[in-house]
Amino acid sequence: MNESFFSLKPIVNNNSRMLILGTMPGKLSHDIGEYYSDKRNKFWNLIYNVFNSEYSYQPYKEKELFVLQNYIAIWDIYSTCIRNGSIDNNIKKAKLNDLPSFLNKYKNINTILFNGKRSFNEYNRNFNYLNIECKLLPSSSGAHTLKYEHKLKLWMDIFK
């Protein structure tokens, strides 16, 4: 059954230097209002491990503080969409967030890291005129079958 989804409020402050841009929160994340809340999604494990910290399912406010302390912002390429479930391939009738205005407001952001190919491809179709460094991360999604150790190595290489 198709449902309407909307982007969560970004995690960002004026000190943020990197923006991790996903597509749209999955159903569980959308329903509870927290980025990457599905335990099959390894986002939080990856981001903590990239910064040499142990991850053990901290409360969401602590996760937000952790990324902000590491100068990272989190947001989505889409503002709204229709989707059945959580898989990006099911996204239909998507509308884009106003990324140029966001970057104009948060002027210290100088790099966008894309959490998967769909957000990267949307950016290239719609915003490639923006003068900002872009890097593609392997998706943290459990649906992306790359082994965790390999994902972590690639994430660490990109964050260096």
Image (cartoon, helix red, strand yellow):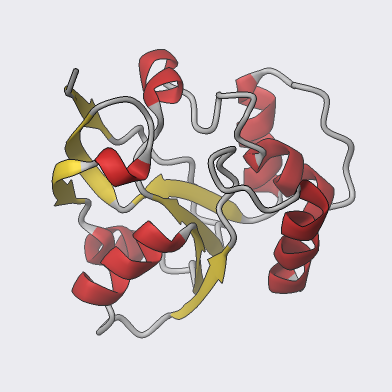
* 12 vs 120: above or below: above
Q: In the picture, which quadrant includes the N terminus? A: top left
- Determine the residue positioned at 75% across, 21% down: 57
Pick out the residue farthest to the left.
Answer: 93
* x, y percent for residue 116: 48, 57
**Vertical relation: 33 (above or below) 120:** above
Q: Quadrant of the C terminus?
A: bottom right
In this rendering, would 120 be left or right of 3? right
Q: Which residue sits furthest top? A: 32
Residue 26 vertical position relative to residue 14 in the rendered view, above or below: above
Q: Position of residue 139 (x, y in %)?
A: 55, 53
In-front residue for pair 87/97? 87
Q: Is residue 148 left or right of residue 129?
A: right
Q: Nearer the viewer, residue 83 or 123?
A: 83
Question: Residue drawn 22% across and 74% down?
Answer: 125
- Residue 83: x and y in percent read 22, 31
Q: Where's residue 71, x and y in %? A: 63, 56
The one nearer the camera, 78 or 82, is: 82
For the point 36% across and 85% down, the residue is 131
Quarter of image, res 151? bottom right
Q: What residue is rendered at 54% in x and 32% in y?
A: 36
Q: How many marks?
A: 0
Q: On screen, 72 above or below 143?
A: below
Residue 84 as seen in the image, left or right of residue 153: left
